[in-house]
Every structure is written in C-alpha cells, then in structure tokens.
Amino acid sequence: FLGYDVLPFLDRTTFFLYPIGLVIILSPLMILIGFNPSRYFLSLYFR
C-alpha cells in the first residue's frame, strides 16, 4: 500500500485543519454574545 506518499501535492495537509479548531473555540463565544456572522457580512454587502 503506497498511500499518500505517492501524492506529492498532499504535503502539510494538517495546515487546513487549523481553522476547524478556531471555529470550535469561537462558536460558543459567538453564541453567548449573540453575534451572527452571516447577518454581519450581509449587512456590509447590502449597505
């Protein structure tokens, strides 16, 4: 079984997992303070 060693473009893929940790940490905080990112960014867009 060669696995991911054959695919050279899959180097340092753990870098893409870091934002998941940030979302997990910030989600409860955003819920507690009542921040809605969708509403915020749409209000910037439709200003």
Image (cartoon, rainbow, N blue to C red):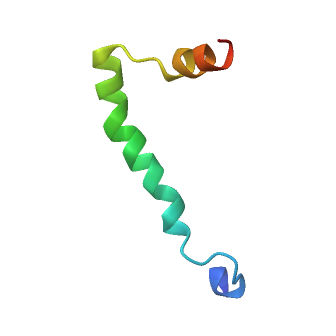
Name the spot of residue 38 as percent of width and height, x first: 56, 20
Q: From the viewer's perspective, is residue 11 above or below residue 32?
A: below
- The quarter of the picture where residue 2 lies is bottom right
Apparent side of residue 28 relative to residue 20 in the rendered image (left or right): left
Apparent side of residue 32 relative to residue 39 in the rendered image (left or right): left
> Across the whole image, how many numbered discs are drawn on residues?
0
| Nearer to the camera, 18 or 45 | 45
Q: Tell me the quadrant of the picture where the N terminus can be found.
A: bottom right
Q: Most extreme residue toward the front, as rendered?
A: 47
| Nearer to the camera, 20 or 34 | 34
Q: From the viewer's perspective, is residue 31 above or below residue 19?
A: above
Question: What residue sits 71% from the left and 87% below the top?
Answer: 6
Apparent side of residue 20 relative to residue 2 in the rendered image (left or right): left
| Nearer to the camera, 16 or 41 | 41
Q: From the viewer's perspective, is residue 10 above or below residue 20?
A: below
Name the spot of residue 26 as percent of width and height, x first: 34, 35
- The quarter of the picture where residue 8 lies is bottom right
Q: Tell me the quadrant of the picture where the C terminus can be found.
A: top right
Name the spot of residue 43 as percent of width and height, x first: 59, 13
Question: What residue sits 70% from the left and 78% below the top?
Answer: 9
Question: What residue sits 54% from the left and 75% below the top?
Answer: 12
